[in-house]
Image (cartoon, helix red, strand yellow):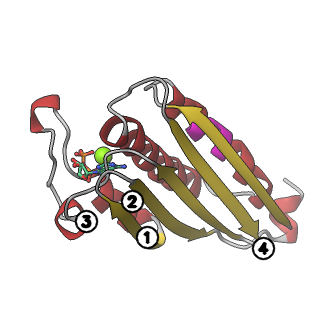
Amino acid sequence: MNNEMTLSFVAIEENEALARMAMTCFITPLDPTIEEISEFKTIVSEAVTNAILHGYECDGTSIVTVHALIEGNKISMTVSDEGAGIFDVEQAMEPMFTTRPFMERSGMGFTIMESFADNLSVESVIGNGTVVKFEKTFSPVTEVSRMR
Ligand SMILES: Nc1ncnc2c1ncn2[C@@H]1O[C@H](COP(=O)(O)OP(=O)(O)O)[C@@H](O)[C@H]1O
Ligand SMILES: [Mg+2]
């Protein structure tokens, strides 16, 4: 089954839950395992939180866009913002690197996303914004699981 969607919302913290729940509904037809759901939600949550917080400082007006494409049992996603951008992507992706230690950020967002997603990549330009791209392949839907 193929499917495609785009969701855009203003940068307020509350919209992290909106994106996480919408995306969880979107993958339901793939009949994901509990573990797959939990990993997928975590990736979405980390990427969207970064866009809202680091990209736009929760300004309440700028737009975060999530795009997703399901092809068979694989989802391909982008989380985009046109905000601050990242000075050094390689450094930002290192475990425990954060530019906001005073806000109790763990600096583990990218590390967690990379461990749960396939082919995660980050494109960013200072002052222009950031696009986080990843794929995730779910276990195939079997006839037995369809009958559950
Ligand atoms: N969308 C974004 N826009 C601007 N900067 C970002 C974005 N996403 C991540 N960053 C930068 O990368 C750093 C590391 O991100 P992450 O690993 O999620 O850790 P944390 O969010 O805990 O700081 C952030 O502290 C921030 O400086
Ligand atoms: Mg983060």
For the residue pair 76 and 81, the one nearer the viewer reads as 81
In this view, the residue in front, 132 or 140, is 132
Residue that numbered label 1 is attached to: 120
Residue 62 highlighted magenta (yes or no):
no
Residue that extends furthest to the bottom in the rendered view of this protein: 119
Residue range (magenta): 19-23
Residue at image x 45%, y 59%?
A: 131
* Amino acid found under the numbered disc labelled 3: Val
Q: Secondary structure at mark 3?
A: helix
Residue 3 located left or right of residue 43? right
Q: Are marks 1 and 2 in contact (CB under 8 Å)?
A: yes
Ligand 1: does it lie within 8 Å of the C-beta at label 2? yes
Q: Name the secondary structure under disc 1.
A: strand
Q: What amino acid type should be assigned to the residue bearing mark 1?
A: Leu
Q: Quadrant of residue 71?
A: bottom right
Task: Tell me, for residue 89, which label it has, or none.
Answer: 3
Image coordinates of residue 56 in percent, x first then y, are: 37, 36
Quadrant position of residue 114: bottom left
For marks 3 and 4, the one nearer the N-term is 4
Gap in Å between the C-alphas at discs 2 and 4? 22 Å
* Residue 20 lies in the magenta stretch: yes
Q: Residue at x 16, y 33 (%)?
A: 104
Label 2: which residue?
113
